[in-house]
Amino acid sequence: MDNEQQIIETLATKVMGWSTMSKQSSFWLDFEGHLRPKRSWNPLQNIEHAWQVVEKLESMGMAVELYTETYAPRNCKIWLDGTVIAEEEGETIREAICKAARKVVD
């Protein structure tokens, strides 16, 4: 299992489309040319950042379905052309979103 930083890096580069000048760089370069501090973007811990991942997937033609029942694991399904291409559970909806999005790009 990858650590949190590896998951964030995969989501930033493969889902969000961001880049970095080097592995040692402390900034992401987003698709609009803005620099974002790496340490400030964490969709595993911040629901706003996880929602950015959902919005990006939707902009790529995917549908995202979330289940947040109180006593059940949180679930995220990602659909493309009427077919579920990823489904993951997590302790939080943020974790479920990140795991499912990562499955789409891996």
Image (cartoon, grey):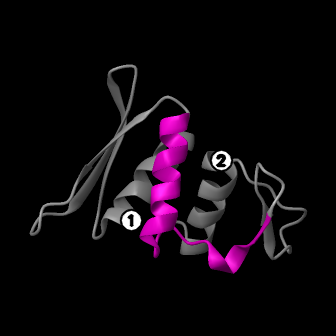
Q: Residue at x 56, y 72 (%)?
A: 42
For the residue pair 100 and 57, the one nearer the viewer reads as 57
What type of secondary structure mainly makes up the magenta span? helix
Say if the magenta span includes residue 100: no
Task: Give the label on residue 20, or none.
Answer: none
Q: Secondary structure at mark 1?
A: helix
* Image side of residue 80 versus residue 72, left or right: right
Look at the picture and state if 82 lies above or below 99: above
Quadrant of the drawing holding the C terminus: top right
Is 32 rendered above or below residue 95? above
Q: Is residue 106 or residue 98 the one in the foreground?
A: 98
The residue labelled by disc 1 is 94
Residue reaching furthest bottom?
A: 39
Residue 53 location, x and y as percent? 51, 53
Mark 2 element type: helix
Report whether 20 appears left or right of 38: right
Q: Amino acid at mark 2?
A: Lys
Judging depth in this view, the residue of 34 and 3 nearest the camera is 34
Mark identifier at residue 14: 2
Q: How far across and how far down the image is residue 81, in percent?
A: 40, 19
Residue at screen point 38% across, 65% down: 95
Mark 2, other Cα within 10 Å: few <14 / some 14–19 / many ≥20: some
Q: Quadrant of residue 41?
A: bottom right
Check the image and report above or below for 94 versus 75. below
- x and y percent of residue 84 in the render? 33, 31
In the displayed structure image, the side of residue 13 where residue 27 appears, left or right? right
Task: Tell me if I can see residue 94 in this picture.
Answer: yes
Magenta stretch bounds: 35-59
